[in-house]
Image (spheres, rainbow, N blue to C red):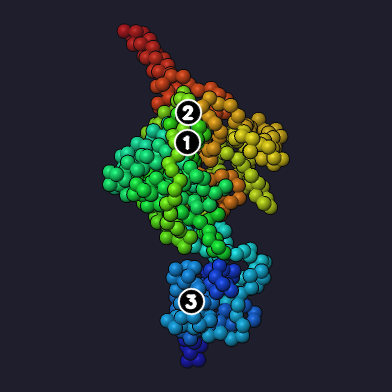
Amino acid sequence: MKALRILLALTILCLAITSASAYTITEFCADGYAKGDGDEYFILEGTGNLSAWSVTDGEGTVSFSGGSGRTVVARSAELYYQIHGSYPDFEITESLTSIPNAIVSGRFQLANAEDSLTLLENGRAVQTVAWPADVAKGNGRVHRFTDGGWDKRVFKIGQSDFAPQTFTAERVTLFVSPDCSHAVITDVIRDADESILLSMYEFTSVSLAEALADAEHRGVEVTILMEGGPVGGISDSEKGVLNYLSRNGAEIFTIESEGNLPARYRYLHTKYLVADGEVTVVLSENFKDSGIPESGYGNRGWGAAVEDSGVAEYFADVFADDLAGYDIYRWAEGSEPLPETPQAEKAVTIFKPVTVGNVQVTPVISPDTSFLVGNALDSAQHSVDIQQAYIAHYPDSENPWLAAALRAAEAGAEVRIQLDGMYYNTDSEADNDEIAASVNRRGLENLQAKILTDREGILKLHNKGFIIDDETVLISSINWNYNSPTNNREAGLLLESEEAAAYYTRVFSYDWDGVVLDNQASAAVGFDIRYLLAGIIIVGLVGLYVWRRRH
């Protein structure tokens, strides 16, 4: 019996020792940006003393004389700090006396193209990851282990990791370009009292620049973050706008690559504004005369102004994270003047803004939470209306969002897909007209694709949105290609609201077949009020008939 007690005690002791020390490699980067990959690193997370744990790449081994908890191990602490802005817990080569050295035997240095990491507990392998067998190689590519697997998303050095959140907004103003976006956005700017944060891919609109300058003169702090390397470079018109805003007190920054140090995101392609920490405007259009026209003639796009402090705080946090990166540069004023205001023929405004209440709002941030777009498409049961500037297949596979829409159609949902018809989206052998043709060749009565070529007031289709099951709306800057959801910084909103869905469905239906309700009452509320009035009349007549029969 005594021997049994001793054996039981030893078993319990062993279990306690085992459970008291458990670690996992949760993150690593084998191919960094610093000279000689001095910023390469791995992270261990767990509990207990690290003295029993080590990591090997097959040629060298790193172990520890102490330490516990989350532990960052970099090749060079100094070079790691230059890229990441924080110091590791241990370094492999001695660069800073303030950072302890790990214990290294052999030659430990991660190869970029092909290598592996193995975590050992008292010399016993407990975890191994190899590249390119388990994860893809890539310069600046960070690999993360979550929920029992590697790389749920493509992650690059310095990128954010925002989680999904949903808010209930009391008021959301719905609007569309080219009809009424300019009025809504200028109203938000003019109503601001304290601060405006603007994140934008391109900005050439003189009237919106003047509205922001007026806000600065009222004492509003205007901070602008721009893409520093858009396709074709920053135009002289944009330089003139940014120079003008800078001279009028706005703080302007660009995000861009420099030398061998790439920017954190392929493009800052966002189009959003946060005013006074209360109102957030998210849209598909740039601050250009074609995107936000005063004339009512320009691109088709969707937008929403959300009055909710939670949504505003979420986007302000994204803005702050983007502004804190290593790839941020203050705008240097040049000599380019503010461009002249273009003269455009006034177009007929068809759709007016509509304000609705009690809307469930979920921000969508690429690349962090762009998976929410796919999730929404996978949830479709009855209908999917999609408007996209273009749809492109992925480098080695079909477009997964298009595939999700097609699966919805195959399951019985009514699916309509509308794409832009401008020459640059239709003149190659694999762009919008080929995508539309391939969709239509499936021969499903409930599946159609069209090219938008001619609608009054519309220059081109620049939208990036959808409506699902008459209740879910996506408003965003996210194009349906590989880079936009995977490598760009993008911004969008998922709105859960039957009223919002009805509003954008009405716009979509006009773009789809050129027919729109002609009475202004219907335009204001987003549905044909004549049906409501007819229903009231019918109910009244039936009631009158019943009353007469009884009397």
Residue at mark 2 to residue at mark 1: CA–CA distance: 10 Å
Between marks 3 and 2 in the image, the one whose residue lies nearer the viewer: 2
Residue, far front: 335
- First-in-chain label (3 vs 2): 3
The residue at which mark 2 appears reads as 344
The residue under label 2 is which amino acid type? Ala
Q: Residues within 10 Å of mark 3 (few under 14, many from 20)?
A: many
Which of the marked residues, 2 or 1, is nearer the chain's N terminus? 1
Q: In this orientation, does residue 322 appear?
A: yes
Q: In which quarter of the image is residue 131?
A: bottom right
User: Which of the two discs, 1 and 3, sits closer to the camera?
Assistant: 1
Q: Is residue 463 rendered to the left or right of residue 445?
A: left
**Residue 422 location, x and y as percent?**
61, 34
- Mark 2–mark 1 CB contact (< 8 Å): yes
Residue at coordinates 42% horizontally, 60% vertically from top-left?
324
The residue carrying mark 3 is: 77
For the C terminus, the quadrant is top left
Q: Which mark is residue 289?
A: 1
Residue ID at (50%, 45%):
236
Which of these two is toward me, 36 or 365? 36
Q: What residue type is labelled 3?
A: Ala
Do callouts 1 and 3 mark residues in contact (Cβ within 8 Å)? Answer: no
What is the CA distance from the residue labelled 1 to the residue labelled 3?
48 Å
The residue shown at (37%, 14%) is 540
Q: Which amino acid does label 1 sit on?
A: Asp
The one of 365 and 446 positioned closer to us in this rendering:
365
| Numbered disc 1: secondary structure | loop
